[in-house]
Amino acid sequence: MSLLRILVLVLISGSTFSVATAKAEARAEVPLEAILGDRAEFDAWAGKFRKEYSSWIDDIQQFQPSGSRIVTRTQSPYGVLHTIAFDYQKSSPLHGKVSGGILAIPKHIDATKPLVVAIHGHEHGQWEMYPDGLMVEGQWPLEFLKNGYVVWVPVSMRHSGITSLATMQGYLPIWTKEISQGIDQIVTSKTVQVPHKGIAAVGVSSGGSIAFLLMAYRSDIQVGVFAGAQLPLVFLRQEYRIKNHPDCWDIPKLASYTPIQALIAPRPVQFQLGKEDPGYPNGEPFARQGDWFAGTSRDVLTDEIGGQMLILKSLWKMKGGEVSQHLHAGGHQMDIKAALKFVSSHSGK
């Protein structure tokens, strides 16, 4: 891709992205020796990088809720939906903003099942709002409730009020911190009891990215399903711009998402990708979507997704775990049947 093309895309989008800056800041990589099967090399790297990565999230301050309260309680055919608001101190960027989420408790509780943290992304439009639209027929989080899981659907994809912080840290780590501290609030609060065993992190699009950042950060998450979340960071930096919208997929300190994903090994995870998803490597560039999205000059490469998955499979095999790639016939969405089967098969272990 020519430098001229990159500059044109940047100018169209109004983005302040700098190729030189991104290259200079991208520094966290899995060592080649580890990828090729040297477990001692991997363990040494992972031990060091885990501390560094955790510090990125830990250093994001003032996102701890000071309390929680039930805003509404709605009866569903499958259980009770609690809209829960979090309160924050005045010094917090979240003070006075919509925060918290929907806590769904099934009619028949099985306390041996994990708490499912269901994180939406760009596939759903309810950003910075209570995601009640995700707990209706046809939406994937509701299917977990139907199958007897306690489901926490957090407010996600926040942009307002955190721009300056995100410029330094990236939006994804901030969203991860907010959702992680929200999980702690939910499971320890006496507002609503949350019977469960372990945690499953499940998400679509940016929600899938948050889910794998969350799972890398928290050792108590047993299983993860990440749908439509395999766009390579290098592709996004070169090609993907939404006009007047921040590059919220970027993490300045990374060359790719692989190092963060590698920290999850050997816990079981499933990546899902639909063959009708624009990010599926079929040779077709992303189409223009009016003035807000200029399209891309190329498609995602098979090498980019396949190569990353082969790296992860090598690392998981070395650590004695399972990472799977599930291809389905749909688009930018969750194959809920496959997700339910995967989470169920790895629960209670």
Image (cartoon, rainbow, N blue to C red):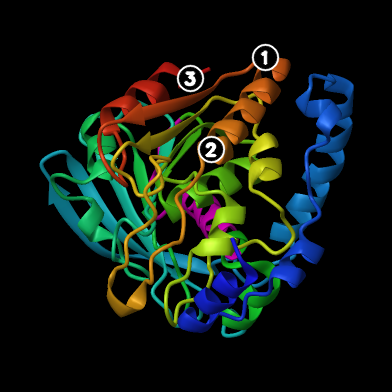
Q: Which of marks 3 and 2 is nearer the N terminus?
A: 2
Q: Is residue 317 left or right of residue 96?
A: right
Q: Is residue 93 visible?
A: no
Q: Does the magenta segment cover residue 178? A: yes
Q: Residues within 10 Å of mark 2 (few under 14, many from 20)?
A: some
The residue lying at 34 percent from left, 77 percent from top is 292
Q: Which amino acid does label 3 sit on?
A: Gly
Q: In this view, does 230 lie to the left or right of 135?
A: right
Residue 135 lies, with reference to residue 126, above or below; the image says: above
Q: Can residue 51 be seen in this view?
A: yes
The residue lying at 31 percent from left, 65 percent from top is 130
In percent of width and height, residue 210 lies at 52, 52
> Label 1 to label 3, Cα distance in Å?
18 Å
Q: Which mark is residue 348?
A: 3
Picture quadrant where residue 316 is located: top right
Residue placed under numbered mark 2 in the picture = 305
Please identify the quadrant where the N terminus is shown.
Answer: bottom right
What span is colored magenta in the figure? 174-196
> Label 3 to label 2, Cα distance in Å?
31 Å
Mark count = 3
The residue lying at 66 percent from left, 49 percent from top is 256
Picture quadrant where residue 323 is located: top right
Residue placed under numbered mark 1 in the picture = 320
Front position among marks 1 and 2: 2
In percent of width and height, residue 315 lies at 70, 24
Q: What residue type is labelled 2?
A: Ile
Q: Which of marks 1 and 2 is nearer the N terminus?
A: 2
Front position among marks 1 and 3: 1
